[in-house]
Amino acid sequence: LPQFTDIAALLPVWAQLLILGTAVNFFFSSADILSVVLADRVVKSLKRSARASRALRYVGGSVLIGLGINLALTRH
């Protein structure tokens, strides 16, 4: 945030940092809360579907197997 402060502005630098810091924390916290709410809805809908649950299990297992093969074949 210091890159957005202006020494020649009407407000002192500490007040500019306080205002900018408060605004940034508000917007980031709002985005985090929105992400959590949307993820909760997605998880709830996926838990209701047996087909989606089975597909995610296969995808997750395939990713882990692929990572294991990659690790086994990688030479340092």
Image: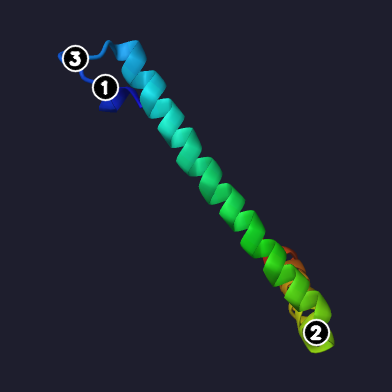
Task: Describe residue 29's horizontal placement relative to residue 40 as left or right.
Answer: left
> Which one is earlier in the sequence, the residue at label 2 or at label 1?
1
* SS at badge 3: loop
Inspect this view and state whether residue 65 appears: no
Q: Residue at x 37, y 20 (%)?
A: 17
* Vertical order, 5 against 55 (above or below): above
Q: Estimate the spatial distance between the alpha carbons at disc 1 and disc 3, rounded to whole Å.
A: 11 Å
The Cα–Cα distance between marks 2 and 1, rounded to whole angstroms, is 51 Å
Q: Quadrant of the N terminus?
A: top left
User: Residue 3: horizontal and vertical position, in percent?
Assistant: 28, 26
Task: For the residues labelled 2 and 3, say whether their Cβ atoms are less than 8 Å apart.
Answer: no
Q: Secondary structure at mark 2?
A: loop
Against 51, residue 30 (above or below) is: above
Closer to the camera, 30 or 58?
30
| Closer to viewer: mark 1 or mark 3 | 3
Q: Which SS class for mark 1?
A: loop
Instruction: Give the x, y percent position of residue 7.
Output: 20, 13
Mark 1 surroundings: few (<14), some (14-19) or many (≥20) residues within 10 A: some
The structure residue drawn at horizontal position 46% and vertical position 42%, both measured from the top left corner, is 27
Q: Give the quadrant of the C terminus.
A: bottom right
Q: Which mark is residue 5?
A: 1
**Distance between mark 2 and mark 3 Cα atoms:** 58 Å
The image position of residue 72, as x and y in percent, is 75, 66
The residue beneath circle 2 is 49
Q: Residue at x 34, y 15 (%)?
A: 15
Pointer 2 with pointer 1, Cβ within 8 A: no
Q: Residue 10 bears which disc, if any?
A: 3
User: Disc 1 residue type?
Assistant: Thr
Q: Is residue 29 at least partly visible in the picture?
A: yes
> Residue 42: x percent and y percent?
68, 71
